[in-house]
């Protein structure tokens, strides 16, 4: 989970994104950018639990 000291006010909890853009870096030092053809895509989340540092269980 990405954590940051910067947050919107009020906080919005969780944000999930699917993107069709890419950046590729080869061992030879070449860089490529592009956009992949979009299809019918989705993100299915069956269960998610998020806790801040004060709520972590040991």
Image (tube, helix red, strand yellow):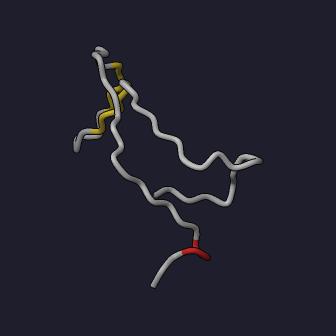
- Residue 40: x, y in percent? 29, 17
For image coordinates 69% across by 49% down, the residue present is: 11
Asked if residue 35 is positioned above or below residue 23 in the image, the reply reads above
Q: Quadrant of the C terminus?
A: bottom left
Asked if residue 40 is positioned above or below residue 49 in the image, the reply reads above
Residue farthest to the front?
46
Asked if residue 10 is positioned above or below residue 33 in the image, the reply reads below
- Residue 54: x, y in percent? 61, 76
**Which residue is more in the foreground, 49 or 41?**
49
| Left or right of 13, for residue 9 | right
For image coordinates 46% across by 39% down, the residue present is: 16
How many numbered marks appear?
0
| Left or right of 8, for residue 14 | left
- Residue 33: x, y in percent? 36, 25
- Residue 46: x, y in percent? 33, 46
Residue farthest to the bottom?
58
**Which residue is more in the foreground, 50 or 28?**
50
For image coordinates 67% across by 60% down, the residue present is: 5
For image coordinates 50% across by 60% down, the residue present is: 50
| Left or right of 11, for residue 29 | left
């Amino acid at each position: 989970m990405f954590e940051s000291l910067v947050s919107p006010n009020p906080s919005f909890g969780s944000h999930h994104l699917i993107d069709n853009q890419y950046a590729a870096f080869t061992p030879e030092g070449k860089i490529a950018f592009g956009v992949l053809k979009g299809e019918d895509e989705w993100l299915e989340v069956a269960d998610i639990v998020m806790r801040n540092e004060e709520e972590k269980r040991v």
